[in-house]
Image (tube, rainbow, N blue to C red):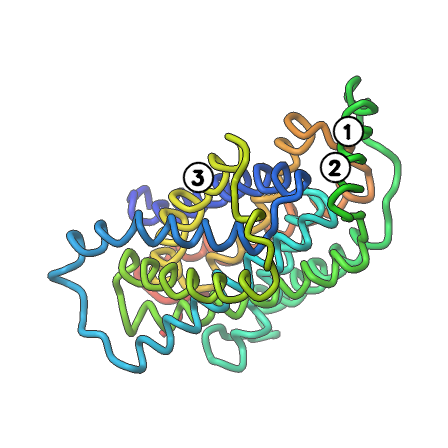
Amino acid sequence: MNSPGLWKPVVVIVVVYFAFAIVNVLNKKILDKGVSPLIVVTYRQAISCVFLAPLAYFWERRSRPNLTSSILCHLFLSALLGATLLQYTFLVGLGYTSATFSCAFTNMVPAITFMLSLPFGLEKLNIKTNAGRAKIIGTLITVAGAMILTFYKGMPLGRPYRGATAAKGNQGNMMDSTKKTKNLTFGSLVLTASSIVLSCWYLLQARIGKMYPCPYSSTAFMSFFATFQSSILSLIIERDFSNWVLKGKLEIFTVTYAGIVATGLCFVGISWCVKQKGPLFTAAFNPTVQIFVAIFDFSILHAQIYFGRFLPLDIYQYYSCLMLLCFIFPNILCWKSTVFWDVS
């Protein structure tokens, strides 16, 4: 029961989502300065590809299976879903909202992943059991929480930061210069689409993990394909080449950190967790991102947190505990048998 192998996926995925929380806060900072989301995605994938390519070559050259057309197609689709579309839609939604608000929508990912995994046979549902009923209740709570988050604001929690007024004035000038305004309706729609794309990518990654069980190589190929995909989209949409120049240290640090850590190492960790425990297990820990981001958003970005925006955080914390009790704990007790996380 105390075997480290049982808790290793839990520790890995929590560390991964902590790193994601940091990059989300950094991305919000540079997006408010007018950096294009597509350009961020392009640089991020290119840096990840350069970083992972030598690691994948030396660490997995003996265990790496031969590439087939089917594997390449799956990797190309993985890049389109998990890198290009996912990161672009999330960054667009992040630009129109806040870091805490945008991460709250990723909490729908466990519910969406669960619903999508049923027809593909990756997850089983028996409403006659307590676990089956818990899955349905958790799914309904997740969707309801996201709707509350969108339409209900509520009272502010805590006192606003003293320099918030001046900061808002400076940010307002930047937003006017880049013609960006907060539109929660549009941002919510884009973030919902991002959550659906992420859920689809989790399911696809479960299949890739069986076909091509090399997380470093698969992530390197994904970054390689995503670099070309996002570059083409960037050249079509961002025709002003001056926008490609990163003008500050924060922009350079953000894309470098996002490429090496968030896309490079974290996607390797996610691929490994999906292979070990399945897509639903990995998606179930998405609510931890909002916990970390809410702390960073309030302490670093000095964003005001409202009761209505914070309420789903408590709901998702409860949902996370529900998922832990219903899935991880039985799996620890009966680790030799396939209980809830059988992805065969």
Place of residue 38 in the rendered image (x, y in percent of width and height, measured from the top left) = 56, 56
Q: Are marks 1 and 2 in contact (CB under 8 Å)?
A: yes
Disc 3 target residue: 257
Label 1 crowd (10 A; few <14 / some 14-19 / many >=20)? few
Disc 2 target residue: 174
Place of residue 300 in the rendered image (x, y in percent of width and height, measured from the top left) = 64, 27
Regarding mark 3 in the picture, which secondary structure is present there?
A: helix
Q: Amino acid at mark 3?
A: Tyr
On residue 144, the disc is: none
Q: Nearer the viewer, mark 2 or mark 3?
A: 2
Q: Amino acid at mark 2?
A: Met
Can you tell which quarter of the image residue 167 is in? top right
- Separation (CA) of disc 3 from disc 1: 26 Å
- Separation (CA) of disc 1 from disc 2: 7 Å
Disc 1 target residue: 170
Q: Amino acid at mark 1?
A: Asn
Label 3 crowd (10 A; few <14 / some 14-19 / many >=20)? many
- Separation (CA) of disc 2 from disc 3: 24 Å
Q: Which residue occupies the foreground of this view, 217 or 144?
A: 217
Regarding mark 1 in the picture, which secondary structure is present there?
A: helix
Residue 314 in sight in this render: no
